[in-house]
Image: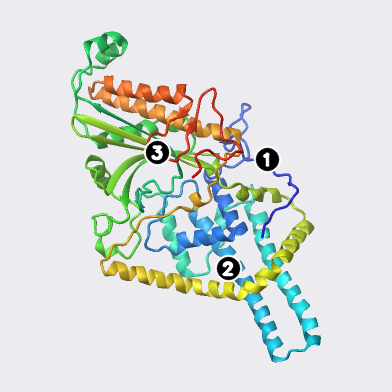
């Protein structure tokens, strides 16, 4: 079902302006607003839940990744309530299966009667009756899903707590487990996609410098003010530190009262351990007794610290700064890692972005206050176009829907057998349901600007926090300052965020001569 009307419907006023939530604000007159504060990921969850009703291929993807992948880890899904979307996906697929079962009965009954007692007079009456019945069945299914969108998915009508509960107990248990794993600090990835779930690459930067190098006297003379400040701070000798110490300082710099979190709503900062799915089996993180379950969602702080101080090819710790805006429609994430060897310090950071959902998923807002007679007409019109193909393919679709649980169970048993025999199994997460729904356009001018703002603010805060940390530990800053100056100058003066070694990625356009990708396809699309 297309679920698209040619005339745009007037919608209610948005609950936010230019990406900023209006709820819980106190006006100048001292009166509090009546708008309630909503979840920061409400909009993205709402659009994805509606997408399961308008695009059944997406609903199948959600069920496949969330419900049927029992052993693989789930990719972090920034800005989306995954169990809510999965519940609506299960409902949409159940409605479609009910329609296919009904159409199969009609078609097979018609064929049985035709073969058993074929008479032209009977066929002239029976054929139109079957077609009309099939048309009504298809239109009914369209009507059910359209009513779900209009009654449950429109802005100011969507309530995540009212998602339908799954019919099967196994599905309910699975979703309860998924809900518990939402805020874990362990990411188990597959292949080369270490930052799975975080979207498209925006850029990559790194600095490497010798911390044992003393500042030249000439440099000290040229930069006399900072040296006086250093003397005032009493920093005269070098203090040793570890990579974990720098990670902790970065978390505090972004999360403290004076950090970036006070300037941006919905900012989260935490450390996460990233492990390849081929290497987690048999490790301390994943005991052999638990090998027939998903990898754990979280690990202890000792594992984070160990992977930060002694990184291995399989496991590394990153500081993650998640900046969400537009109620989950835009999520920019910064990944930072420091490697300290005693005389050298390597620092790398990567920006990735989850753009807004695809434009076709945004069309649900056109159905606001659509009259009932127009809803009926729309469903009957779409049903008329779909009746013949749906009727002829219904036995195959019905058989496929009936076999799906058994196919999933057989695959689960096969994977369990592979694990029990000790063969290599990839526990890594695949593409998230949020990434599958991403579009390539920035549908609002200010949304594109906010994306650039998040990158610039986070990078500035990062470089300043690292400088403050090094200064407190008596580390000469000449190498660090010179490299950071080049990075910042390239960012601001050249109007682009140079993606460095990241290939086929989207550059962040900044500066007075920049052009934001608003309404046009973003450059760098793979």
* N-terminal label among 2 and 1: 1
Q: CA distance from mark 1 to mark 3?
A: 40 Å
Q: Which labelled disc corresponds to residue 94?
A: 2
Residue at x-position 53% and y-position 56%: 85
Q: Is residue 159 visible?
A: yes
Q: From the viewer's perspective, tell me whether residue 320 is left or right of residue 232.
A: right
- Where, by quadrant of the figure, is residue 247 drawn? top left
Residue under pointer 3: 502
Asked whether 39 or 348 is in front, the reply is 348
Q: Position of residue 343 (x, y in %)?
A: 19, 29
Q: Within 10 angstroms of label 2, few (less than 14), some, or many (20 or more) residues? A: some
- Residue 53 lies in what quarter of the image? bottom right
Q: Earlier in the sequence, mark 2 or mark 3?
A: 2
Secondary element type, mark 2: helix
- For label 3, the SS is loop
Mark sitting earlier along the chain (1/3) = 1
Left or right of 151 on screen, residue 316: left
Q: Which numbered disc, 2 or 1, marks the residue closer to the eye?
A: 2
Q: Locate residue 107, reporting x and y percent.
A: 67, 79
The nearer-to-camera label among 1 and 3 is 3
For this rendering, which residue is in front, 33 or 348? 348
Count the numbered circles shown. Answer: 3
> Which residue in the structure is indicated by mark 1?
13
> Where is residue 480 drawn, in percent x and y?
29, 24
Whether residue 258 is visible here, answered yes or no, is: no
For image coordinates 45% across by 41% down, the residue present is 504
Image height of 241 relative to 150, above or below: above
Q: Position of residue 145 (x, y in %)?
A: 65, 61
């Amino acid at each position: 079902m297309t679920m698209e009307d040619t005339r745009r419907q007037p919608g209610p006023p948005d609950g936010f302006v230019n990406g900023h939530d209006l709820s819980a604000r106190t006006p100048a007159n001292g009166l509090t607003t009546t708008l309630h504060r909503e979840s920061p990921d409400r909009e993205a969850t709402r659009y994805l839940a509606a997408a399961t009703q308008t695009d059944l291929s997406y609903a199948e993807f959600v069920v496949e990744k969330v419900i049927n992948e029992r052993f693989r880890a789930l990719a972090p899904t920034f800005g989306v309530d995954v169990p809510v979307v999965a519940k609506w996906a299960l409902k949409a697929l159940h409605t479609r299966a009910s329609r296919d079962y009904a159409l199969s009965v009609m078609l097979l009954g018609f064929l049985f009667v035709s073969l058993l007692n074929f008479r032209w007079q009977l066929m002239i009456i029976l054929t139109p009756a079957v077609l009309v019945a099939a048309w009504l069945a298809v239109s009914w299914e369209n009507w059910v899903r359209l009513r779900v969108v209009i009654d449950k998915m429109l802005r100011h009508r969507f309530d995540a707590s009212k998602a339908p509960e799954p019919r099967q107990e196994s599905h309910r248990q699975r979703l309860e487990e998924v809900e518990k794993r939402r805020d874990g600090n362990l990411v188990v990835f597959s292949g080369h996609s270490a930052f799975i779930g975080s979207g498209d690459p925006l850029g990559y930067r790194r600095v490497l410098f010798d911390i044992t190098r003393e500042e030249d006297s000439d440099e000290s003379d040229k930069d006399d003010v900072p040296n006086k400040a250093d003397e005032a701070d009493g920093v005269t000798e070098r203090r040793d530190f570890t990579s974990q110490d720098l990670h902790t300082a970065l978390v505090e710099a972004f999360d403290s009262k004076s950090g970036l979190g006070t300037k941006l709503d919905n900012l989260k900062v935490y450390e996460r351990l990233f492990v390849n799915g081929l290497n987690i089996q048999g490790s301390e993180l994943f005991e052999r007794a638990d090998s027939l379950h998903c990898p754990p969602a979280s690990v202890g702080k000792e594992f984070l610290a160990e992977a930060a101080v002694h990184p291995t090819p399989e496991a590394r710790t990153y500081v993650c700064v998640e900046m969400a805006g537009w109620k989950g429609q835009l999520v920019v994430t910064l990944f930072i890692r420091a490697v300290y060897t005693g005389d050298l310090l390597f620092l790398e950071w990567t920006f990735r972005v989850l753009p807004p959902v695809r434009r076709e998923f945004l069309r649900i807002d056109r159905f606001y206050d659509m009259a009932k007679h127009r809803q009926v007409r729309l469903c009957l019109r779409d049903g008329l176009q779909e009746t013949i193909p749906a009727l002829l393919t219904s036995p195959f679709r019905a058989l496929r829907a009936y076999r799906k649980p058994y196919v999933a169970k057989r695959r689960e048993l096969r994977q369990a057998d592979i694990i029990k025999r000790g063969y290599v199994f990839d526990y890594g997460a695949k593409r998230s349901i949020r990434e599958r729904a991403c579009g390539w356009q920035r549908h609002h001018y200010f949304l594109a600007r906010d994306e650039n703002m998040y990158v610039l603010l986070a990078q500035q805060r990062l470089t300043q926090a690292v400088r403050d940390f090094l200064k407190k530990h008596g580390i000469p800053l000449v190498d660090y300052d010179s490299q950071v100056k080049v990075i910042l100058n390239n960012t601001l003066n050249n109007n682009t965020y140079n993606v460095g070694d990241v290939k086929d990625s989207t550059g962040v356009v900044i500066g007075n001569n920049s052009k934001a990708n608003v309404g046009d396809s973003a450059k760098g699309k793979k």
